Image (tube, rainbow, N blue to C red):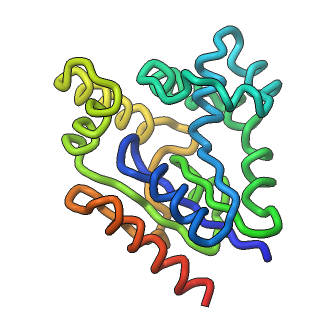
């Protein structure tokens, strides 16, 4: 069975947590596409060469969840050649036998516009910044500024900007707990699976 769940949304909205839970619940493979861009960003050097030479070991780095890696990912994600180098990898993963869940910023709009399920997971910038601050620490006001800066960069880039697909189901996690958000996502997937 080929069945793709595309989950998009801004940083710290909960899409990674929801994606992993959906994949586990339905026995699908999971890919955090942001980890591809994070790995390219933290590798340094020529980002296009890094994207073309990316290996599974690069995705296992311990520093991929850092704030620095997130900012680096956002900077290299605006480079069309980097996006092109990672596009086919993501598409092959998405259409694998047994089902797949991919989370990122352009899964439902660019990578897998044919996905059987498209979700857009979001939350207010303040809620997302607080979550990220709990995760990485530092100055909470600075984290909010970085979240807003990243949103502007991700939503304003010319190539594959962050936006909800026209047929995506919106899940706003501003007021939802993790379990409620996961239940909402799983309900959509279960319905589409029939």
Picture coordinates of residue 143, whole percent (x, y): 26, 26
Left/right placement of residue 125 relative to residue 149 reads left
Residue 182 quadrant = bottom left
- Is 173 rendered above or below residue 2? above
Question: Where, quadrant-wise, is the N terminus in this rendering?
Answer: bottom right
- Is 147 rendered above or below residue 90? above
In the image, 25 versus 193, the foreground residue is 25
Who's the residue at 45% across and 18% down the image?
68
Residue 152 quadrant = top left
Q: How many marks?
A: 0
Left/right placement of residue 194 relative to residue 120 reads right
Question: Where, quadrant-wise, is the C terminus in this rendering?
Answer: bottom right
Who's the residue at 38% across and 31% down the image?
150
Who's the residue at 68% across and 31% down the image?
59
Picture coordinates of residue 32, whole percent (x, y): 59, 45
Who's the residue at 25% across and 18% down the image?
138
- Is 44 rendered above or below residue 177? above
Q: Residue furthest top?
A: 45
Residue 129 quadrant = top left
Picture coordinates of residue 167, whole percent (x, y): 49, 72
Picture coordinates of residue 57, whole percent (x, y): 76, 28
């Amino acid at each position: 069975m080929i069945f793709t769940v595309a989950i998009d949304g801004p940083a710290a909205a909960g899409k990674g947590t929801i994606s992993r839970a959906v994949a586990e619940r339905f026995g699908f493979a999971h890919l955090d596409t942001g980890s591809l861009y994070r790995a390219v960003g933290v590798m340094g050097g020529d980002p296009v060469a890094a994207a073309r030479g990316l290996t599974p070991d690069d995705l296992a780095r311990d520093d991929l969840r850092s704030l620095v890696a997130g900012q680096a990912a956002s900077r290299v994600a605006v480079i069309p050649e980097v996006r092109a180098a990672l596009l086919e990898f993501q598409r092959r993963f998405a259409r694998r036998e047994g089902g797949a869940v991919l989370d990122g910023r352009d899964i439902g709009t660019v990578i897998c516009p044919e996905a059987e399920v498209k979700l857009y997971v979001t939350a207010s910038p303040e809620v997302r910044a607080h979550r990220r601050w709990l995760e990485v620490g530092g100055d909470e006001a600075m984290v909010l500024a970085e979240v807003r800066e990243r949103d502007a960069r991700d939503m304003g880039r010319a190539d594959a900007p962050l936006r909800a697909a026209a047929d995506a189901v919106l899940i706003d996690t501003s007021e939802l707990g993790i379990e409620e958000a996961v239940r909402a996502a799983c309900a959509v997937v279960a319905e589409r699976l029939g």
